Image (cartoon, rainbow, N blue to C red):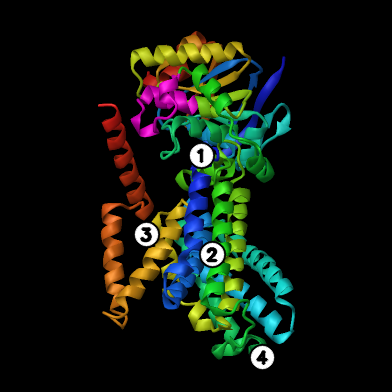
Amino acid sequence: MNTILELEHVVKRFGGLVATNDMSFAVEKGESVGLIGPNGAGKTTIFSLIMGEHKVNSGSIKLHGEELTRLRTHKRIRRGIARTYQVPRPFAEMDVLANIEVGLMPDSIIGMLTSGHSEDEGRAIARSVGLGEGDLHRDPAELSMGDLRKLELARTLATRPQVMLLDEVFAGLTAGEIEQISGLLNEKRQEGLTYVIVSHDLRSLEPLIDSAIAMTQGTLICRGSYQDVMNDQAVRMAYLGQ
Amino acid sequence: MGGTINWRHLLLWAVFLGGMALLPQLVSKGTLRTFIFANYLAIFAMSWDVLSGRTGYISFGHPFLIGIGAYTTAILSYRFDVPVGVSIPLAVITTMAAGTLFFLPALRVKGTYFALVTLAFMELMYQLVQVIRPDLTGGTRGISGVQTLTRGAVNGYYLSLVLMGTIAVSLWAMMKTRMGTALSAIGMNEEAVEGLGLNTTKLKLFAFMVGAGVAGIGGAFYVHYLGSIAPRALFDINFLFTIIVAALIGGASTIIGPMAGAFFLTFLLEYLRPILPGAERYFIYGGIALVLYMYQPKGIYEVIRQAHFKLAGSARHEHNP
C-alpha cells in the first residue's frame, strides 16, 4: 500500500457546531475517492481543513507522511495538493492565459521578477483541459460555466498537484459538459493524479471513483465500493431517512 | 496587468519624457514650478499605487512614509551636517525599515481596518514629531533652511523630471514581470492567489517596501527642493487625499494613471486659483472627480485608452472597408 493522503482523528468545531467529528481516512496514490453525503454533511469543510483554509481543532493530516496541519495553504500546495471550488473564482480582470499563469508562478520574489512569462506552458495546460486558442484572451465573464470549470482545473493543474480535491466539479454543467469534464479527469488520472471528489451528481461521480466515503453531520459513516456504500443502511438513513 | 515589455511602449515613454524635457523652453518659470509639484505628486501617487492600487490594501497613511523620508534627510543634513549624498539613501532605507516595522502588523488586517490603522499612523506621526525631540524635528514649526539640491526652477524641474521618469519606467518594467500579474491578482482575489501556492504576505510586504522606498525617495528629494519641512504640511488629510485622488482619478493599478491624475489635479487646482482663491476650489475638483468616477471609474487612463481604441478601430476600418 502506498498512502499519499491520510487524515487521523480530525476534529473541527465552529463554536458549538461540530463540523468534522473524529474523521479518519486514507487515500492511496493514484486512487480516486468520492466523498458523499447530504447537504451540510461537512464535505467542503474537510477540503478546507486539508488545504489549511480552516485550522483543525485536533487530529492530523499527512501528505506523503508529512504533517500538514502547521503549514499555511500556499506551502501545502507546494507539497503537491490542490483543490477546486464549488463556485469557480477566477481573477475577473485577467484573461484566461493570465489566470493560468498565476498558477505557474514560482513562490519567490526574485523568481517572479527575473523569470519570463510562461505563455507556452500556459497554452499547453489550457489545451490539455480543452480550452481552445480562441479562449486564451477572453475574460472569465465571457466564459460558460463549463469553460469556467475548465479554467479552474487548468489553474489548479498549473500548480503541479499530485492530489486534487475536486469540489462539485459538475455543478451547473450541461450533460455534454459533464461528459467532457469526466473525460478530462479520467485522462489526467492516467497520468498519475490522485483525486478526492465531492459531488451531488452521483451518477456522474460513480464511473470516476474507485471507492466512496459517506459522511453525515461531520462523521464518517461508511467506506467501501460505490455500490456497497449506496446499499449501506446508515447511508440510506442519512440520504433518504429510511 | 503583466505582460512582456513592449518596445513600442518603451519608445512612447522615451518620447513622453523627451517632450517633458523640452518644457523649460516653452513655459514660464511659474508654470514650471507647478510642473515640479506635479512631478513630485506623481511620484507619491505612483508609490501609493504600488501597494494600494494593485493589491486593494488602501493605505491612508502614505504621508507617514513620505514624512519619515523627508524628516530623516532634513534632520541628518541640517542638524548633523551629514552630506546629502549620504542622508538621502539613509532616509530611503529608514522609510522602508520603519514603514515595514509599523505596517507589517497592519498587513494582516483587511479592508477598512487596514485603512484605519494606517490613518492612525499618520496622525500618530503628526503628534510625535511635535513632542519627541523638538530640538531635532523643530516641533510644530518644523525645520527651515534645509540644504537645496538645485538652484532655480529649471534645474529643480529637471531633477524632479529625472526622478519621476526613472521611477515610472522602473515601476512599469517591474509591473510587466510576473510580479505585476501576481499583485493585481491579489487585488482581485487574495485567497485564490494563496490557493495557487503563492505566499501573499510576502508579496504584499514586497509591494509595500517598494512603495515605501519610492515614497522615501520622493519625500527626501521634495524636502531638499522646498528647503523646509513642517508637520502640518506633510501629515495632513488634504495632502493624503490629493495623493489618493490623483491615483484614482488617473487610473489605479497603472503607471500612467497616477501620473496623469497628478498632472490633472495640480493644474486644475492651479488654474482655478485666480477664479476661486479659497477652499471653494476643492468643490470644483470634487465635482469633477465625482463625474469622472460615475462616467469611468477606472479613471483618465481608461478614457484615453478607449479613445485610442476607437481611433485605431476607425483607422483600421478605413483601411479595410
Image vertical order of residue B304 relative to residue B242, above or below? above
Disc marking residue B249:
3
Q: Are marks 4 and 2 on the same chain?
A: yes
Image vertical order of residue B241 relative to residue B320, above or below? below
> Which of the two discs, 4 and 1, labels the residue nearer the N terminus?
4
In this picture, which residue range is highlighted in magenta? A131-153
Image vertical order of residue B263 relative to residue B130, above or below? above
Distance Cα–Cα, label 4 vs label 2: 34 Å
Quadrant into which the C terminus of chain B falls: top left
Distance Cα–Cα, label 4 vs label 1: 50 Å
Image coords of residue A183 (percent x, y): 48, 11
Mark 1 or 2, closer to the camera: 2
> Which of the two discs, 3 and 2, labels the residue nearer the N terminus?
2
Residue pictured at 35% horizontal, 55% vertical: B300
Q: Residues within 10 Å of mark 1 (few under 14, many from 20)?
A: many
Q: Residues within 10 Å of mark 2 (few under 14, many from 20)?
A: many
